Amino acid sequence: MLLTLSCHQIGKIDWKNRLDRTLKDISSYYKDEFESSGFKSDGIPFEMDNLGYRYHLVQGLKPSNDYTMNSGGEIEKEIFEKLTAVINPGVNKLPKEINYE
């Protein structure tokens, strides 16, 4: 699970517990809906480790007001630069830019 924050944003103290509950609810909802349609499901397999759900926090380089609906490529670059070594250590260059417009 990826959580992005602007450079001045500080997450709520209880953000992890709130997100844990939200992900459990989402997974449970999908599990129930799949099963009501006749499909076996364990819900959504969100990334987990021995401590529970795994979160990747990325703090942006700018204040939130400086990001717009057209900042997708910029945000993607910030995420890639900060998380590539954690998520995909074999990759060392930014993928082809995506046009979000």
Image (cartoon, rainbow, N blue to C red):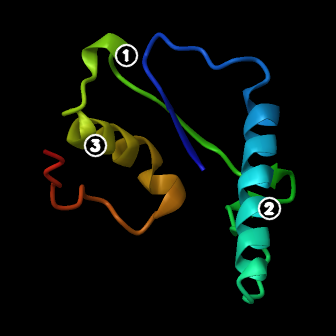
Q: Is residue 20 visible?
A: yes
Place of residue 67 in the rendered image (x, y in percent of width and height, measured from the top left): 28, 22
Tag 2: Cα neighbours inside 10 Å, few (<14), some, or many (≥20)?
some
Report the residue marked by disc 3.
77
Q: In which image quadrant can residue 37 be found?
A: bottom right
Foreground mark, 1 or 2, reads: 2
Residue at the image position 71 percent from the left and 78 percent from the top: 34
Q: Amino acid at mark 2?
A: Ser
Specify which label sits upstream in the sequence, 1 or 2: 2
Report the residue marked by disc 1.
64
Tag 1: Cα neighbours inside 10 Å, few (<14), some, or many (≥20)?
few
Place of residue 41 in the rendered image (x, y in percent of width and height, measured from the top left): 76, 81
User: What is the C-alpha distance between the residues marked 3 and 2?
Assistant: 33 Å
* Mark 2 element type: helix
Q: Amino acid at mark 3?
A: Lys
Compared with residue 53, is residue 7 higher up or lower down, i.e. above or below? Answer: above
* Mark 3 element type: helix
Tag 3: Cα neighbours inside 10 Å, few (<14), some, or many (≥20)?
some
Q: Amino acid at mark 1?
A: Ser
Place of residue 7 in the rendered image (x, y in percent of width and height, measured from the top left): 43, 16
Compared with residue 101, is residue 62 higher up or lower down, i.e. above or below? Answer: above
Report the residue marked by disc 2.
28
